[in-house]
Image (cartoon, rainbow, N blue to C red):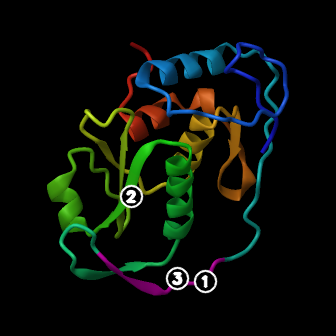
């Protein structure tokens, strides 16, 4: 991970910061954090990764739907559930109320109005900043979406996506809104 500006104290020097949070940030504070990232004028250095091999056919994996508890099979191609669970655990560890569930296609279609199904397995991500709120739910099957949100919650300016491409959090407002339900432009 690259260096990130110190946005908590308003200082935009390029030093790596370690977050020590007494509580997770509110929606308003998260909006302010994104505004600070957008205002940062530090030059952005991009790096491009590569996929230099020919993948073989993926195996079929059996999973259990967390909603209906039925078993189903899905293609192991691109399955990153363990890495997604690790990121969700890290979000919890820094104080956010998040969770991740696996859903079969039937349950995903019946339980989430934001369904954009492209896979044969669905990861339903739940996020809220206040226990008195309902969870925002999103079917988030893209590992990079979790990495983006984690970088943002940790006050990091950038993150490495698939194949080690560099992405900047302030350029991913749609992803952050999709994952959190927060309208950052209001």
Percent coordinates x, y for residue 65 in the rendering: 27, 73
Percent coordinates x, y for residue 126 in the rendering: 35, 48
Q: Are marks 2 and 1 in contact (CB under 8 Å)?
A: no
Position of 57 relative to 94 (above/below) = below
Residue 21 figure quarter: top right
Q: Which stretch appears magenta?
A: 55-64
Residue pointed to by mark 3: 58
Which residue is at a point 39% across and 33% down the rendered structure image? 129
Q: Is residue 58 magenta?
A: yes
Which residue is at a point 43% across and 78% down the rendered structure image? 75
Tell how many labels. 3
Quadrant in which the C terminus is drawn: top left
Q: Are marks 3 and 1 in contact (CB under 8 Å)?
A: yes
Front residue of 124/45: it is 124
Task: Tell me the crowding category of disc 1: few under 14, some 14 to 19, or many 20 or more residues within 10 angstroms, Cα based.
Answer: few
Front residue of 14/54: it is 14
Q: Is residue 119 magenta?
A: no
Q: In whole angstroms, how far apart are the C-alphas of marks 2 and 3?
A: 23 Å
Task: Tell me the crowding category of disc 2: few under 14, some 14 to 19, or many 20 or more residues within 10 angstroms, Cα based.
Answer: many
Percent coordinates x, y for residue 49 in the rendering: 76, 54
Q: In whole angstroms, how far apart are the C-alphas of marks 2 and 1?
A: 28 Å
Q: Is residue 84 left or right of residue 10?
A: left
Secondary structure beneath label 1 = loop
Question: Disc number at residue 78?
Answer: none
Nearest-to-viewer mark from 2 and 1: 2
Residue pointed to by mark 1: 56
Nearest-to-viewer mark from 2 and 3: 2
Residue pointed to by mark 2: 100
């Amino acid at each position: 991970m690259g260096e990130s500006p110190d946005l908590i104290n308003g200082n935009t020097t390029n030093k790596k910061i370690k977050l020590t949070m007494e509580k997770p940030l509110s929606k308003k504070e998260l909006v302010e954090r994104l505004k600070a990232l957008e205002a940062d004028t530090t030059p952005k250095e991009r790096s491009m990764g590569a996929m230099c091999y020919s993948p073989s056919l993926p195996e079929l994996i059996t999973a259990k739907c967390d909603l209906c508890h039925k078993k189903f099979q899905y293609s192991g191609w691109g399955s990153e559930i363990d890495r997604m669970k690790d990121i969700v655990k890290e979000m919890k560890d820094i104080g956010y109320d998040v969770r991740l569930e696996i859903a079969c296609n039937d349950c995903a279609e019946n339980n989430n109005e934001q369904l954009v199904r492209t896979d044969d397995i669905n990861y339903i991500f739940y996020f809220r900043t206040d226990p008195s709120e309902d969870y925002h739910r999103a079917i988030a099957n893209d590992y990079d979406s979790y990495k983006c949100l984690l970088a943002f919650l940790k006050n990091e300016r950038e993150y490495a996506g698939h194949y080690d491409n560099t992405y900047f959090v302030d350029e991913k407002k749609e992803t952050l809104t999709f994952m959190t339900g927060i309208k950052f432009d209001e």
